[in-house]
Amino acid sequence: MQSEYLPMLQQLKINYESRITRGYAFRVQQLQHLKAAILKYEQALYEALAVDLKKSKEESWVTEMGMVVAEINHTLKHLKKWMQPQKKATNLANMPSVSKVYAEPWGVVFIIAPWNYPVQLLLSPLVGAIAAGNVCVVKPSEFADATAHVIQKMIEETFPANYVYCVQGNGAEVVTALMQQFTFDYVFYTGSTAVGKIIYRQAAEKLIPVTLELGGKSPCVIAADANIPVAAKRIAVTKFSNCGQMCVTPDYVLVHRSVYHAFVEEMKQVLLRFFGEDASQSDNYGKMINEKQWNRVVGYLQQGTVLFGGSVNKEHLFIAPTLLGINDTNIPVMHEEIFGPVLPILPYENKEDAKQIISVNPNPLAFYVFTQSNELAEAWLAEVPSGGACINNCSWHLTNPNLPFGGRGNSGIGQYHGQYSFESFTHPKAVFKTPAWFDPAIKYPPFTGKLKLFKWLIR
């Protein structure tokens, strides 16, 4: 392992220290190369995503390649401004100095991607890393094998290995070996909370800063005054996208008892319209990534009452879009991130009851509330800490490059997208410039008798 990877890791460091990656023109050129490569390999990526996750071309563009292209376009539009040193105010005691913050690249960064969105969740952070002036090691997920090999071919054709280096193999083994043998300047990981803790521990041993984009149980609340038809469509389109294998999908729904039956019936009708009587035949519905994940999610079907769906096919890794009625919250499906097409639905009587259920899994990656009352929506936002949130929508906050995306607590550390990606992949370096022509004696010993003046200056 050491002889295979270490020489190239050292070449990455040498290349970064040459400062070639720092210039604005270079960064723009590399982003343009990446965009051109995505468009060149568009068909190959469609085919690979269909093999790995049964994604349609439309879903693949909206949630994978298209999102990365949009991220590149946004970054190219704003990069020059982001790179400029930001002038800051200078306090009275330090006049006439000038204060600025420089965006300094971290250096050699390590991006570790998951299998559920194997294009977007590897290349979107890469956009930020390139824009910030770093060199990169990228690790696609071996579980989305077809996509990983297309990405490797695309990256190796587009970038020299001492600039963007793509490594394959067993994630646990490769990541652990790389982290032990080389001191990265920054680590960006997307995946499960359990693995995130391991990577955080490995990074902490070398004081490496990190962004951890994790998961959790993102709750969705349906208030008594919610627009039920709209809520059902917006929940269904995100919950069952990618066969439910999305970190910000609604993990469970808390429905005010007065509209519980209306909501369940509307969800049934929406799922029939979206995917038909047999979702396994729908071009708009995917499959589980592998047998291990299929087995795990199928196990949840016995933990509640199947209100809709419930059919499965192990050979095709199929699980139908399923609505699961829940009466007992002390069961695994209400404590583990589902990451599949099973949606628990629970009635609640009042806000305090719903908050009690949510509090069992605090700091979700996202929180969703459907209500026509601005006052009630703001109250919910104030009382449920989360990485991000939507009012009368689900998941789409992550598609706006002007908003930060990230978690808190168990759902993650740090954020990215748009300028937030650039900021994550740079260190904000404080720079303080003082002219030599102004050098008052008050700054130097002896200090006796200067206390009154100090109190006037520093307060």
Image: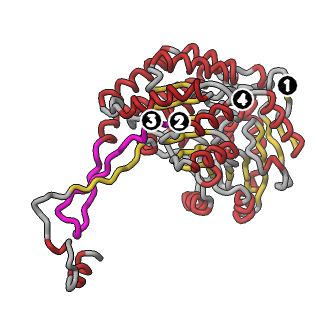
Residue 185 lies left or right of residue 119; in this view the side is left
Estimate the x, y position of residue 100 in percent, counting from the top left. 27, 53
* Between discs 3 and 1, the one toward the N terminus: 3
Q: Quadrant of the N terminus?
A: top right
Displayed quadrant of residue 246: top right
Residue 256 lies left or right of residue 434; in this view the side is right
* Between discs 3 and 2, the one toward the N terminus: 2
- Marks 3/4: CA distance? 41 Å
Residue type, numbered disc 3: Ala
Residue that label 3 marks? 129
**Mark 4 vs mark 2: in front:** 2
Residue that label 1 marks? 314
Task: Name which residue lies at 40% across and 47% down.
Answer: 427
Q: Secondary structure at mark 2?
A: strand
Q: Using the image, determine if residue 91 lies above or below residue 287.
A: below
User: In this picture, which residue range is highlighted in magenta?
Assistant: 84-111
Closer to the camera in the image, 281 or 298: 298
**Mark 4 vs mark 1: in front:** 1
Task: Name which residue lies at 74% across and 52% down.
Answer: 259
Q: Residues within 10 Å of mark 3 (few under 14, many from 20)?
A: many
